[in-house]
Amino acid sequence: MSDAVSAGPPVVTPPPARAHSRAPRGLFAAATLSALLVLLPIAFTFWRAASFGIAEAVDLIVRPLVGELLVNTLLIAVSTTLVCAVIGTAAAWFVERTHLPGRRAWAVLTAAPLAMPAFISSYAWVSLSLDLQDFAGALLVLTSAYFPLVYLPVAAALRGMDPALEESARALGCNRWATFTRVVLPQLRPALLGGMLLVALGVLSEFGAFTLLRFRTFTTQIYAEYRTSFDGGGASLLACLLIVICLVVLAFEFRVRGAARYERVDRGTRRAVLRYDLGAWRWIVVAGFAALAIATLGVPLGMVGYWLTQPGAAAVTPADVSPELLFDATISSLGFGLAAAALTTLLVLPLAFLLVRYPTRFATLFERTVFLAQGIPGLVIALAIVSLAVHALQPLYQSTTLLIIAYAILFMPVALVSVRAALLQAQPRLEETARALGLGWSQTVFRVLLPLAGPGLGAAAAMVFISVVTELNATLLLAPIDTQTLATQVWADTSTMAFAAAAPYAALLTGISLFASGLLFALLGKSALLGERG
């Protein structure tokens, strides 16, 4: 035994599994900071609301206005979520399960509206017809902006399903509809419910589109209360009601989804996806996809192009475009986006590493705390940060630093998903080998870990950049005086019906968003390729 060992290469004994070792104090402290940043504005919102007396709070809540806001908010959220679920699921099934002519082109065009901010779509539709400033207009605009949130996960789930399930159902005598409802749809439940959750939370958090569409919801009233009383507790009390609604939605989605398991048990050769022939319905389905593309992309891009060719006097409210303001707004949007992308990625990196390499109850608690930001409207968090700055962080009030921190709090959940996935693809054995060969901790991180996780980190930064460039709520409340971004300028000009003046800002914002989205998809593809090689 000793001879055999001495004759071979030296054996490196791997360190104990990190799941059972303690995380470095610095790593734990950095992860704690990320969680506290998210928790602070939420806790402050409830603290401000608690400043109301019980009688005063009841008088504020039982007003007829609050009842109207509740009905409008719930009605538009439920309606948009259901319509997006139907359109997104149908589009995914036709793209992934049928011989649809131009299938690849329709797949791209169906996902592309995700890069079009809802308030840009509302700007386009309102400038086309002021008659759309009602519930029907809000439903049209929000559906066209949010349905890709259902389409993308459902399409991915359809691609990953085992076609043997459908073949068995057909062999047992089920027709296409029975096969879909009894076999396919139950398998799509996690993806479908997850997409519907994102749509519902997005609608509950929406502000810019509702303002331009003159549709009153909790977010528009919270902003109005803030503008009226500035640091009053009324806005915080309404914000607490909206937070409760969002948390109820989260709990309902978790309850409906249940604890069922849907993963494939076998790991055999991947079989070809089963596709159906559309027959006489082929061109009707193509016409439906064309109408969807026109409504979601054609009208917004077409109206932006139209107003670009019109002089400022052609709008309802005449206004001229200042080249200097256009340049400054573009630089501000790009600068805020890059700074927030860098800060957010850095903040979630320790937490993601803690989750992947040192999984503990504390790590899970930090993760769930960060994901609270996904379920809390951005306007609520921004309002809390404003009040917090006024009361305790006066030097940071109306500063760029505070705005960048607010962006990081809002979009940490977005970055955490990609960063954690990237670190999961980096095999721990490579880090252990590097340490065994004499590399220090910092050298291992920069020479082994970061290159492996690079595409995923880039994807996280790109997603945050897109979110920040198109963000409106926090920017309106927290941007320093006389600082404009492309998003706030579109909102300001459209609010005064200066559609021609808003067009250059909308065009630049759309172009930046589409370019960053293309870069994001490229990074995600590269990350997936590296994961397969690993």
Image (cartoon, rainbow, N blue to C red):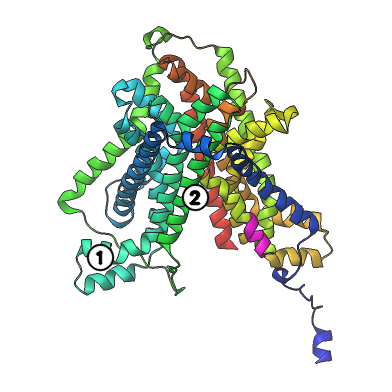
Q: What kind of residue is marked 2? A: Leu
Mark 1 and mark 2: Cα distance apart in space: 34 Å
Which residue appears at 37% of the width and 11% of the height? 316
- The C terminus sits in image quarter: bottom right
* In the depicted structure, whether residue 495 falls above or below residue 265: above
User: Is disc 2 placed on a helix, strand or loop?
Assistant: helix
- The N terminus sits in image quarter: bottom right
Query: x, y (%) of residue 418?
Result: 58, 51
Q: Of the residues under marks 1 and 2, which one precedes in the sequence?
A: 1
Examine the image and state in which quarter residue 345 appears: top right
Q: Main secondary structure of the magenta part?
A: helix
Task: From the viewer's perspective, tell me whether residue 369 is left or right of residue 25.
Answer: left
Which residue appears at 37% of the width and 60% of the height? 188
Q: Residue furthest front?
A: 55
User: Is disc 1 placed on a helix, strand or loop?
Assistant: helix
The answer to whether marks 1 and 2 mark residues whose Cβ atoms lie closer than 8 Å is no
Residue 300 lies in the magenta-colored region = no
Residue 382 shows up from this direction: yes
The magenta stretch spans which residues? 359-366
Query: x, y (%) of residue 224?
Result: 49, 26
Q: Residues within 10 Å of mark 2 (few under 14, many from 20)?
A: some
Q: What kind of residue is marked 1? A: Thr
Residue beneath disc 1: 179
Instruction: Say which of 221 and 356 sits in front.
Output: 221
Query: x, y (%) of residue 61?
Result: 46, 37
Which residue appears at 45% of the width and 68% of the height? 263
